[in-house]
Amino acid sequence: MSNLTAKAAPEFLKDSVIYQINLRTFTPDGTLRAAERLLPHIAALGADMVYLCPVTLADDDPRPEFWSDRQKQSGLNNPKNIYRVGDYYAVDPEYGTDDDLKSFVRTAHGLGLRVLLDLVYYHCGPSAAFLAEHPDFAVRDENGEIRNGHWHFPELNFASSGLREYLWRNMEYFVREFDVDGYRCDVAGAVPLDFWEEGRRRIDALKPGLIMLAESEGDRREEQRAAFELNYGMTFIWSFPAVLRGEKPASALREAREQRRAEALPGARFLAAFDNHDLANDQYDDRIEKLGPERIEAALAFCFALDGVPLLYCGQEIADSHRHSIFGNRFYGPGLVIDWSNAVTPAGERRMRFLKELIALRRRTPALTQGETVWLDNPYPDELLTFRRTMPAESVLTAVNFGRETRTVGTGGGEVLFRGGGAALNGGDEAVLPPSGFLISRT
C-alpha cells in the first residue's frame, strides 16, 4: 500500500483551469445553443476545460416525498431536479437536442476547450426509465420496496451486474457519440470504486487523455490509483466561504489541505475553489461575491497559487452576484441567471482583467503548476496564510491576509509577480498586507 502513487495525469492538466457551467443559470434561455455562443468568452478568459452540470433528462415526478429538502426550500416548485435523473441516455429537451450537445462539444474543441459531463450514478429519479423493466437496478429493503438515499431519491444497486453494465455503456456512449473529454462524477464516494475503475478502463479504450473528477472528500485513498485524476477535497471548498465571511479561521483551509494531502496517495490532485453550483444555490441572495472585489480577488489569488487545479464557477469572471438556483429555469423562477450586463461595468471589467492576468501568471510560472507546496508558519495563522511553491530552479511565495487587521510578513526579498488588496512592500524583505491584501513573489 505504501508504494502506491496516484495515476499519471495528462500533461495538460497541470496548467488547466476548469470553468463550470450550470446551463439553467448561465443564460436566460438556459440552453446548449445559448451557452455555445459564449464559449469564445470562456476561451478568451483562459480556461481550457468546461464542466457542464447534468444535461441528461431530469425526472419530473411531482410527488414531494421524492423531492430533496433543498428542492422544497427553494420555493420554485420545479419538479425537475437536475441531479434526479430520469433517463441517462437522453439529453433533456430543456437544454436542447443530441445535435445541440454535439455542436457544443465541437465548438468547444475548436476553441481549445475540453468538455466534461456530469454523471449522477448514486441515485436516480423515482420514475426513471429503467426501473419498471429492471427492478434489480434499485436497492430494495426487506419488503421489496425501493430504498431512498440521502436526498429522498432511489439508490442505485451496484450489486446488480445488469446495472453496472448499463452504466458502463452510458459512460462509453457519451465519449463515443458526443466526443466528450471526461466526467465529473457526482457523489463519487458513494459508488463502489471498482465500478469507477472498470468504467475508466472502458472509456480509455475509446479515447486517450480523458479526465475524471470525483465529487468526494478524497478520503477513499485509492480513488486516484486508476479511476480519477482529481478529487474535490470537499472540506476545503465548503470551508472557504466561511473563512471569507470571518466565520472560520483561515487556518481551517491549511488544515483541510494538509489533512487531505497526508491521507492521499502521493501525487494526488485536488480542486482549488470556493464557489460552485451547490454553494451558489445555497447562498440564495447572499452570494459570496457581495463581500466585495478585494475579498474575492484575494481568494482567487490563493486558489491559483496553490497546488491543484483551479475551478471557476460561471459568472465569477464578471463579478456576478445574482441569486442562482439549480432548481430555477426559464419556466420556474426565471431571472435567477447571470447578469451579463455586469461584464461591461467597472467591476466586471476589473474582474476579467484580474483573472486573465492571474491565469497567465500561473501558466508562465512553473513553480505555480509543478512546485511542491510548503506551508510556512507565521504569527497570525488564523488570519494570514503563507506558503511556498518550490522547485529546484525557483521558489514562489504566496501570502494572503484573510483577517480584519493589517499584518506584516517577511518575504525574503525577490521579484513581486502579483499583488492586490493594497499590499505594499516595506523595505526589501517585508510586505504589509491590509485585510484582503495578497502578495505573490519569486525568490
Image (spheres, rainbow, N blue to C red):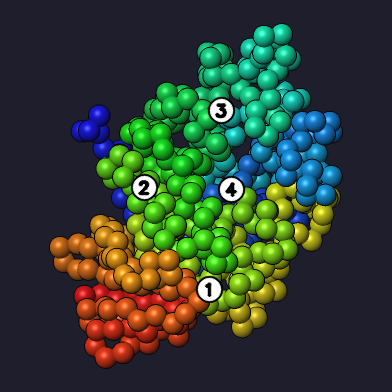
Q: Nearer the viewer, residue 5 or 398?
A: 398
**Left of 253 or right of it: where is 174?**
right
- Whichever of callouts 1 and 3 sits on the residue coming sooner in the sequence is 3
Residue type pointed to by label 2:
Gln
Q: Look at the numbered disc 1 and give the secondary structure of its residue.
A: helix
Q: Which residue in the protein does label 3 denote?
A: 170
- Whichever of callouts 1 and 2 sits on the residue coming sooner in the sequence is 2
- Whichever of callouts 3 and 2 sits on the residue coming sooner in the sequence is 3
Residue type pointed to by label 4:
Leu
Q: Which residue in the protein does label 1 denote?
A: 295
Q: Which residue in the protein does label 2 denote?
A: 259
What's the distance in space between the residues labelled 4 and 1, CA to CA? 27 Å
- Whichever of callouts 4 and 1 sits on the residue coming sooner in the sequence is 4
Task: Point out residue 334 in the picture as x, y percentages from the top left corner.
Answer: 81, 57
**Left of 44 or right of it: where is 329?**
right
Q: Do residues under tags 3 and 2 come within 8 Å of each other at their CB atoms?
A: no
What's the distance in space between the residues labelled 1 and 3, CA to CA? 42 Å
